[in-house]
Image (spheres, rainbow, N blue to C red):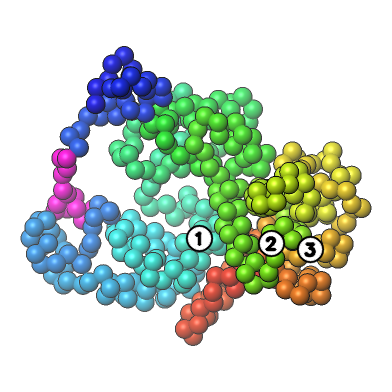
Amino acid sequence: MAYVNGSVGGGVKDLYGEDSATEDQLITPWSFSVASGCTLLRDPRYNRGLAFTEKERNAHYVRGLLPPAVYTQDLQEKRLMHNLRQYDVPLHRYIALMDLQERNERLFYKLLIDNVEELLPFVYTPTVGEACQKYGSICRRPQGLYISLKEKGKILEVLKNWPEKTFSIYCIRRQKRATGKEYAELLDEFMHAVKQNYGEKILVQFEDFANHNTFDLLDKYSSLHLVFNDDIQGIASVVLAGLLASLKLIGGTLADNTFLFLGAGEAGTGIAELIAHEISKHTKAPVEETRKKIWFVDSKGLIVSSRLQSFQHFKKPWAHEHEPVKELLDAVKAIKPTVLIGSSGVGKTFTKEVVETMASLNKKPLILALSNPTEGLGLMIVEKAHEKLQHGNFPAATDQHNQTQS
């Protein structure tokens, strides 16, 4: 492919440097090197440990660098699962799994795929929350590219330190969070640098940004960059899929339902917006109209028009005309929703009274308890899972969510 004055052969200009992003890293595309010996055993992507066959040990110069026994991955998996079940503390299981990932990725992912129900609570919610809190104490080997305020002004240079085109980028700001102009300048530099270094098609995910920033960032960058926020868009798509599937059981259409959310953060409002657009698409009604079928309860009660001045901008579209209501149970009685969705950070809110009221109002009420557990509830869930495992009866993922909120 020829480049002429910033253009690709054919006269199309390379506006963002996508096609020239790797000009300074020239390689022959069909040439590659294969690690061997100690280098191979220290590379978690290719190390198979004792699963290397006799023939492979000779071919890759690892004979003598491993114990002489040959164990298949299946046998290694059984031994590892036995060892993991000896840990009583969830964080210890998490650490053991991360240690495995750092030395043998193939076995790590095989373990997860074959035992996803059992291991998910330890590599994801709720144990991963504790792991994040104690990251400084349990970190063994950095996995990713870390960008902080110290890198402001040289982010492109830092990005070039990452050796591969396949990557994950973790943005950590351990120090006091920047605000205002400094914050905006750091994000602008980062967004420009990733596109310049990795090309036009790079996808940037905004993970765990504060509510007051998430919506603004999506609005600001979506017209020029490929951006995605899992808390707003990813969760919303999964929940919408669940709602559409549930219609096969409860009947009717999405537009026939009235929705009540507990929690009006980025997850809840993101789900609600996607529901409103889906209803609009099928009914041809304006989104402003379909939003009226969706209600929210936040920490101060039902979101209504009389509270409009106190809302953050992303809550305002959901403020409808209604008298103030303080408690969730009273909101259920007043709104009479057919669908109740939990998307807050507070547990034990879908009480027996709330569920019974939903059942009295609807022949087939739909309740989605999606709120993240508190620290105490999270530990309870893991302990219950551990008990079930000892008796060979592990609950389905949906049951865990219901335990979390009820």
Circle 2: element type: loop
For the question of whether residue 92 can be seen, the reply is no
Tell me which amino acid carries mark 1. Tyr
* First of labels 1, 2 by sequence position: 1
Q: Marks 3/1: CA distance? A: 31 Å
Q: Residue 147 carries which label?
A: none
Is 195 on the left or on the right of 345, as rendered? left
Range drawn in magenta: 30-42
Which of pointers 3 and 1 lies earlier in the amino acid sequence?
Answer: 1
Can you tell which mark lies on residue 253? 2
Helix, strand or loop status at disc 1: loop
User: Most prominent secondary structure in the magenta stretch?
Assistant: loop
Q: Do the residues labelled 3 and 1 touch (CB within 8 Å)?
A: no
Asked if residue 313 lies left or right of residue 305, the reply is left
Q: Give the residue type that dot 3 points to.
A: Pro
Q: Distance between the residues labelled 2 and 3?
A: 15 Å
Q: Which residue corresponds to the image point at 12% horizontal and 62% vertical from the top-left?
A: 56
Q: Point out residue 289 in the picture as x, y percentages from the top left corner.
A: 77, 46
Q: Which residue is drawn at 52% across and 38% down?
A: 227
Q: In terms of image quadrants, where is residue 293? A: bottom right
Which of label 2 and label 3 is nearer to you?
2
Along the viewing direction, whichever of 217 and 80 lies nearer the viewer: 217
Q: Name the residue under label 1.
A: 124
Write the residue at 72% across / 57% down: 255
Q: Report if residue 32 lies within the magenta region.
A: yes
Residue, disc 3: 337
Q: Nearer the viewer, residue 56 or 397?
A: 397
**Magenta stretch holds residue 41:** yes
